[in-house]
Amino acid sequence: MQHPHFRKRISKKLEPFPASTRWKRLLDDAVYLAGIVGPAMSLPQLIVIYVGQDATGIAPLSWFSWAVLDIPWILYGIAHKERPIIICYTLWFIINILVGVGAIVYG
């Protein structure tokens, strides 16, 4: 018996994962990289807030709103078993929460 997600990919003629062609596998890898590098680009903001203890000009409502908007994406990734989406938006959720909390504590 095959996993339902695997059967769905076959019945709808979706590309297998990992992809069968080299350039699509490279694209798969690029998506993972972007999903990690994107949130990592917010680390300087976290350093300014937590090390410098300065959250001047940071609006906690904005960062918490972004965190709330990450939740449907995480659930979507889980429901569709799309690991890149799960990883990316979980990292964004953590970053957004940390910045929002830092904005309250040091703002």
Image (spheres, rainbow, N blue to C red):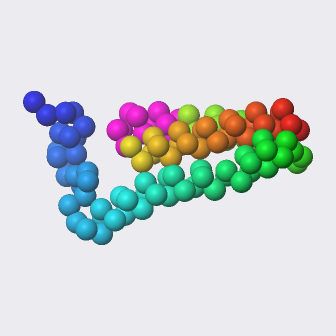
Please state if 52 lies on the left or on the right of 86 as rendered.
right
Please state if 13 lies on the left or on the right of 37 as rendered.
left
Q: Residue 102's x, y, as percent?
A: 78, 37
Q: Main secondary structure of the magenta part?
A: helix
Q: Quadrant of residue 105?
A: top right
- The single residue placed furthest to the bottom in the displayed view is 23
Query: 64 or 107: which is nearer to us?
Result: 107
Q: Is residue 65 visible?
A: no
> Which residue lies at the image location 37% right of the left edge and 59% below the top edge?
29
Query: 20 or 46: which is nearer to us?
Result: 46
Please state if 95 lies on the left or on the right of 99 as rendered.
left
Quadrant in the picture for the C terminus? top right
Q: Is 76 inside the magenta-drawn segment?
A: yes
> Which residue lies at the image location 20% right of the left edge and 61% below the top edge?
20
Q: Residue 80's x, y, as percent?
A: 36, 38
> Which residue lies at the image location 42% right of the left edge and 62% below the top edge?
30
> Which residue lies at the image location 74% right of the left edge and 48% below the top edge?
47
Quadrant in the picture for the N terminus? top left
Q: Is residue 6 visible?
A: yes
Vertical comparison of 76 with 41: above or below = above
Vertical comparison of 34 with 91: above or below = below
Vertical comparison of 32 with 3: above or below = below
- The single residue placed furthest to the left in the displayed view is 1
Q: Residue 62's x, y, as percent?
A: 76, 42
Residues in magenta, as a range:
72-82
Q: Residue 40's x, y, as percent?
A: 60, 52
Please state if 78 lies on the left or on the right of 1 as rendered.
right
